[in-house]
Amino acid sequence: MVARFSSLGIPHDRFPPFCPVGPSPHQQQSSSWDFSPIPMAPASNHRGHQRISDLVQGSCLLLLLVVSNPLLCQGEDYAPYCKNQTGECRIPLQNLFDTATMVANYNRRLAREMFDEFDKILFRLVVSLLHSWDEPLHHLVTELLRLKEASPDLLSKAAEIEEKTKVLLEGVEEIQKRVHPEEQEKETSYPVWSELSSLMSEDDDVNKTTFYKMFHCLQRDSSKIETYLQMLKCRYTTC
């Protein structure tokens, strides 16, 4: 069992290994959690049978003592087994629960550490996305004024989202400053928009296609930003 847990990369010193009762080169394991019985030769008489029975009981009591308190065992990664037992040998249920809960606790702490590290990445990603729309939104509003097909409602929405994006960026940077003050000195890189020439193109097809792409990308990135902020909100406040 310890070998199975060790394969997950968990340090051995966090989960003390189980000690075997004694060496048995002919022992066959059925799994990491269960162990097959070892057949034994029939006793030649009643006294011999009684002696073997006493040995079996003593061996199993010793096994129970060892596996019920794994902190007593320090050594190599061996799995426990029953020596010279006629019946099925199983690890005690209490010990299985103890080991399983220790691994579950270890996984929970690893997951928390990963999440704590990744939320800094989410903040930077949100800031990067918001910064990347500074120039495109400015030119989007400007070029929509030249577009004959653009309705007043469309122009109004474009101007509003440009203004609200600036407000949102300031708000996110303030949140990041409070949550991760060590990050405020770091510069955030963001994608550079390269579609200005296409947006200002005299070719109607190129011009309309660029508008379509911008609207699509703006919708996609706005959805991402909202999702990331919801995740961060649940991390630091009540969802």
Image (spheres, grey):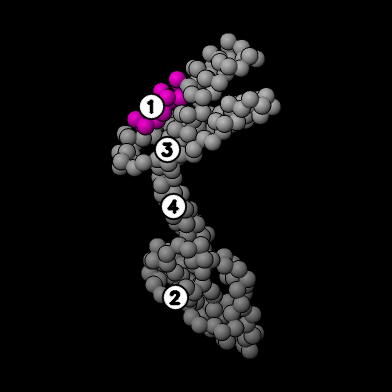
- The residue beneath circle 2 is 76
Q: What residue type is labelled 1?
A: Gly
Whether residue 62 is situated above or below residue 46 in the rendered picture: above
- Report which residue position mark 4 lands on: 110
x and y, in percent, of residue 146 in the image: 58, 16
Q: Assign a secondary structure to mark 1.
A: helix
Q: Name the residue under label 1.
A: 171
User: Is 226 left or right of 207, judged from the image as shown?
Assistant: left
Residue 166 inside the magenta-drawn segment? yes
Q: Name the residue under label 3.
A: 123
Question: How far from the left and from the top, in percent, is residue 132?
Answer: 48, 34
Q: Residue at x 31, y 34 (%)?
A: 178
Between marks 4 and 1 in the image, the one whose residue lies nearer the viewer: 1
Residue drawn at x 53%, y 13% is 156
Which of these two is toward me, 166 or 155?
Answer: 155
What is the spatial separation of the Cα atoms under label 4 and label 2, in whole angstroms? Answer: 25 Å
Residue at screen point 54% across, 83% down? 24
* Label 1: how many Cα within 10 Å (few below 14, some 14–19, many 20+): few
For marks 2 and 3 on the same chain, the one whose residue lies earlier in the sequence: 2
Q: If you read the primary sequence from the N terminus, does the residue marked by circle 1 or circle 2 appear first?
A: 2
Q: Which of marks 4 and 1 is nearer the N terminus?
A: 4
Q: How crowded is mark 2: few (under 14 residues within 10 Å), some or many (20 or more)?
A: some
Magenta residues, start to end:
163-175
